[in-house]
Amino acid sequence: MAFQNNSNQEMMSEINVTPLVDVMLVLLVVFIVTAPLLSQSLEVKLPRTAAVAGRMDTKLQTVTINAQGAISLESISISDADLAKQLAEAAAGKDNYELHVHADETVPYGRVAQIMAIAQHAGVSKLSFMTMAGQ
């Protein structure tokens, strides 16, 4: 049993754009609402203070890592094992010991991480990385 369509209606070939317009209007409203939130920032005036002098009782040492990855403690070349011994002796039981690291900008991060690990295992709790001020 077959149904036949005797009318001369042709297939509708137009696209219904109403749902597309509805979606676009919703997106436009969302964009209009969220755009101002993205550009807002908080303006904060930070207080200005005088420079504070460092602690006078701080025991300070400097480790320098040159471009080749060689290290020196207080301008004296030293091996990794000797560095660990020196740092362990210097930091033993002292709360005021501080180590400054001067690393060449071309030194791979892995080498700097090795020096950080040596310092941590030696008991150094205060570690500072020294940089040059930008121009």
Image (spheres, rainbow, N blue to C red):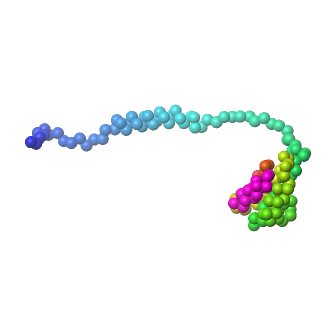
Magenta span main SS: helix
Which residue is found at the position 86% from the left and 52% from the top? 60
- x 85%, y 38%: residue: 50
**Magenta run includes residue 57:** no
- Relative placement, left or right, of 53 versus 27 is right
Placement of 120 over or under 41, stated as above or below = below
Q: Looking at the picture, tell me which residue is in the foreground, 133 or 107.
A: 107
Q: Is residue 121 magenta?
A: yes
Q: Report whether residue 83 is seen.
A: yes
| Numbered range of the magenta stretch | 110-124
Residue at position x 85%, y 41% in the image: 51
Q: Could you tell me which quadrant the N terminus lies in?
A: top left
Residue 62 in which image quadrant? bottom right
Residue 36 screen position, x and y as percent: 57, 34
Nearer to the camera, 101 or 39? 101
| Residue 4 lies in quadrant | top left
- List the single residue furthest toward the front: 93
Image position, residue 73 (x, y; %): 84, 60
Residue 33 lies, in percent from the top left, at 52, 32
- Furthest residue to the right? 56
Count of marks overlaid on the render: 0
Task: Give the residue at the far left of this rendering.
Answer: 1
What residue is shown at x 80% (from left), y 65% (from top)? Answer: 79
In this view, the residue in front, 78 or 109, is: 78
Q: Nearer the viewer, residue 42 or 110?
A: 110
Q: Quadrant of residue 22?
A: top left
- Is residue 130 visible in the rendered structure shown here? no
Q: Residue furthest bottom?
A: 68
Image position of 23 with respect to 104: above or below: above
Where is residue 132 drawn, in percent x and y? 79, 54
State left or right for residue 115 relative to residue 5.
Answer: right
